[in-house]
Image (tube, grey):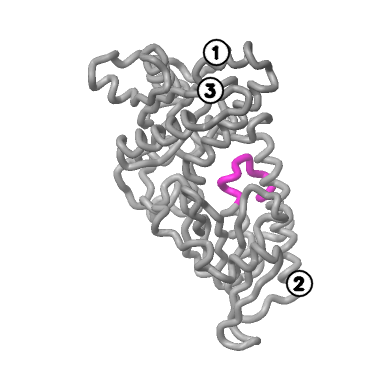
Amino acid sequence: MATLTEHIIKLTDHRDRELLDLTLAKALIDLLRMDRVVVARVVSEEGVRRWLDVASLDVRGGGKVVDPLRVDFQMLPKVADERDRLRCLEEGGLVEYAWAGEDGPRISYLPLFAGSADEDEGVVEIHSGSPLSEGHLQVVEDLIHVFRNMYKLLAYSDRDALTGLLNRKALDDTFYSAVLEEMDHGLEGETAVLESQVLPVSERRHRVPPNYWLGTVTVDSFGVIADKSGHLIAEEVLLLVARILNNTFRTYDRIYRLGGEEFAVLMHCPEEALVLAAFERFRANMEKFNFPQVGRVTACAGFTRVTAEDSPNTTLERCERAVDYAQRSGRNQVHSHDDLVRRGLFGETAKVGAVDLF
């Protein structure tokens, strides 16, 4: 059995925030031998907040890890329906539910993040046969503290300094470590590629490759806005565009700022029509928003399906061709690259290498 120090080393050895939840759950199971440990996050869509169990492990070796990009949001429990979890968030401390007497089995909840200022919300849920001792609670709190420090450190390196959105480095990391690897392995639908790190190959079930889509968004006539209104107002426009993106897309969709006035969204969706509808909602929300000191600002978007042969560059290139078509066609439009190809408006281009030239 690994020691506390060894598990702390594992937590601090990661360069991917997606693995921290799983590593925390594994550490608690290994060190404390609790019946079950669940790491649950709050996700939202159109103002509705629900619970997503991102990692769930038990002492007998069972468990699962869920990819937030691939969840069926409507099937998740609402935040208010899990009262003890919600109370843990609201009180910011330990909450216990003893379901068979004060000295019997219980579920203990501790907040995953500290303070109400955190953008992320979640709880660690521990199932045990008896109350947690002071020693056990200290181990749990120490590990959660290390988790928080690592999460903040990795979040800082993955975020755009101006908007707080994910940056290009984060897009490349997710693309290679999750999207393409999942396509290669063909993991079971309800689990993420993270599961390939904890389950033997014999336990993985094959399925049809998932439907990942990448889209880019470019603010129309942004250079004119900057020249006319100045640098500070232009930055304020970018901040508001980031807010509209966050309010339009789902919590578990990945939203990036690629640089300048260009943004990107990585999402999982079963149908092209649904992806188009999501980007159209964003376009409409941009069009009707009144930007202070600027007024009406529009944007173009282009998206494409991700294939197993893609790199981030080749996928972005297709998105940008669709955006360029939208801008040349009058701006304030959304186009699917795949649909433009089907319509014969332009053919496929040769794929470029994986080296960034900008």
Q: Is residue 50 magenta?
A: no
Q: Nearer the viewer, mark 1 or mark 2?
A: 1
Confirm or deny contact between disc 1 and disc 3 (CB under 8 A). Answer: no
Amino acid identity at mark 2: Gly
The part of the chain drawn in magenta is: 9-20
Give the Cα separation between the discs numbered 1 and 2: 54 Å
In the rendered image, the vertical position of residue 137 relative to residue 225, given as above or below: below
Q: Quadrant of the C terminus?
A: top right
First in sequence: mark 1 vs mark 2 = 2
First in sequence: mark 1 vs mark 3 = 3
Q: Nearer the viewer, residue 346 or 135?
A: 346
Q: Residue 329, image x and y in percent?
A: 36, 14
Q: Residue 355, image x and y in percent?
A: 52, 17
Q: Which mark is residue 357?
A: 1
Q: Which mark is residue 262?
A: 3
First in sequence: mark 2 vs mark 3 = 2
Amino acid identity at mark 3: Glu
Q: Residue 291, image x and y in percent?
A: 58, 28
Give the Cα separation between the discs numbered 2 and 3: 50 Å
- Residue under label 2, please give it: 135
